[in-house]
Amino acid sequence: MQIELIGVVAFLIGLISLGRSPGFSVYMVFLSTLLGASAAAILSALGGASLQPAHLMLAFVLLKVGTNPYRLADGLSSLSFPRPGFWLLITVLYALAGSVLITRLFAGSTNVYSIARLGDGVRIALVPLVPTTGNLTQSLYFASDLLAYVAFYACSRELGSRSLSVLCSAAVVCAFANLAFGLIDVATYLTGTGELLSFLRNAGYTMLVEVEMAGFKRVVGSFSEASTYGSASLFLFTFTGKMWLEEVFTRRAGLAAAASLIAVIASTSTTAYAGLAIVVTFEYLNCLYMLVIHRRSTRNATLFLFLGPFVVAFLVMLGALQESVWDAVQNIYQAAFSEKLTSDSGIERSSWNYQGLQNLFETNGLGVGVGSTRTSSWPLAVLASLGIIGTVTYFAFVLLFFFARPSKDDRTRSFQKSIRLACICQVVLGSIGSPFVDLGLLFFMCAGMSMAVSESEKSASVARAQMLAGSVPAE
């Protein structure tokens, strides 16, 4: 194992977190997820896999939870039946078993798209199914999602009523930091000093940091490519934008949403652009539904409903009047959508998805195991990797989280709405272009903290009802 400089820094911050409140851990992990191109350590025993700073930080949160019996009991309670955590636990156990057993049971009986070392180098190719180190690394990433859910469920229980406020505040800070990384990326590119960021871009991934689209630099920030930067920026835009609509941290959230929207546009990511259109349309219809059907709307949501279409129309007309601006927009659109969908890359990704469905049928619905194959859509990756059983349990977890009973407190309910919309955004992004079953640490961190509040209030309501029922004398 090779320890990197950023790993030493992350380790020291992790040690500091052991003596601080759980709120510090929330900020620590949230911000560390921005370091998508970084490796705290290179794991040579796992084929040179990178240990990301966020996972190292998570280890310290787990240590803090595991060494406190009360926190540990709170965390483990999230896995009891029929809570969402139970279904996530079953999914992860099935994934771990499948990566060991299914890959051997069906070895050679079906072909998968996987990273292969061929004569012309390392690339994704159609090869027979065999156990690989990818099964181990991707299964460990997925298992870490479960651990993140449990750990931050426990942290939320300890923080109590202010837990979601801390989480949403961390999202605002993260949004500004993300834009700052994007500005630094552009500045170092224009000045030819990109090597100054080499200490951040030390992971064993392909670094597409000097790529242009239609004459514009594709901004990657602290990530390895524009697509991941755009996706992270859209997650933060959705999170903070919903906070602005719900009028919590109104000024800070509004500025953070504007900063994140700039980052999304600068990324020139097809996935982020498509996700932006879907999420904004979804939330517009939701705000319209709340106003028309329930007669409930905040002032900011009303502004969004009535001024949003006019602002978009104004910007389109303004751009159309400026020939140079309109030409630039058209060039980006053609490069991001029209040309990309008909490119070799677009055709190749379609073949990945088709083969993923073939893998499902050729393994009798059991899947080929996490890390065995590659698709370009999260639902198809889940089906191909986890089969029917794993898909049912995974989707049960996601749906139970999304449809959990909201808080009775207005402010807490607004925080929950912001968190859930951000997580819906993550599912949308994954459905558009993710090759993995993993939805990311932030998804499970947010889910764990939100569910802790919902289930704590539900338990309190049940206990109160039982107490009242016990106080009524029998006739």
Image (cartoon, rainbow, N blue to C red):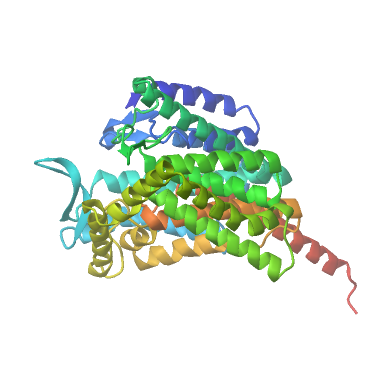
- Taking the spot 41% from the left edge, 44% from the top edge, the residue there is 323
Residue in front for this viewpoint, 350 or 88: 350
Q: Is residue 79 above or below residue 138?
A: below
Q: Quadrant of residue 282?
A: bottom right
Q: Is residue 286 above or below residue 236?
A: below
Residue in front for this viewpoint, 184 or 394: 184
Judge from the rendering whether residue 299 lies leftward or rightward of residue 436; answer left or right: right
Residue at the far left in the pictured view: 119
Residue at the far bottom in the pictured view: 475
Image spot of residue 78 (x, y percent): 58, 54
Image spot of residue 462 (x, y percent): 74, 63
Judge from the rendering whether residue 14 lies leftward or rightward of residue 212; answer left or right: right
Q: In which quadrant will I find the C terminus?
A: bottom right
Residue in front for this viewpoint, 383 or 122: 122
Image spot of residue 287 (x, y percent): 64, 61
Q: Is residue 448 above or below residue 187?
A: below
Q: How many marks?
A: 0
- Taking the spot 50% from the left edge, 54% from the top edge, the residue there is 425
Visible in this render: residue 75?
Answer: no
Judge from the rendering whether residue 81 lies leftward or rightward of residue 221; answer left or right: right
Visible in this render: residue 20?
Answer: yes
Q: Is residue 116 above or below residue 40?
A: below
Q: In which quadrant will I find the N terminus?
A: top left
Image spot of residue 191 (x, y percent): 37, 20
- Taking the spot 18% from the left edge, 58% from the top edge, the residue there is 107
- Taking the spot 74% from the left edge, 67% from the top edge, the residue there is 295
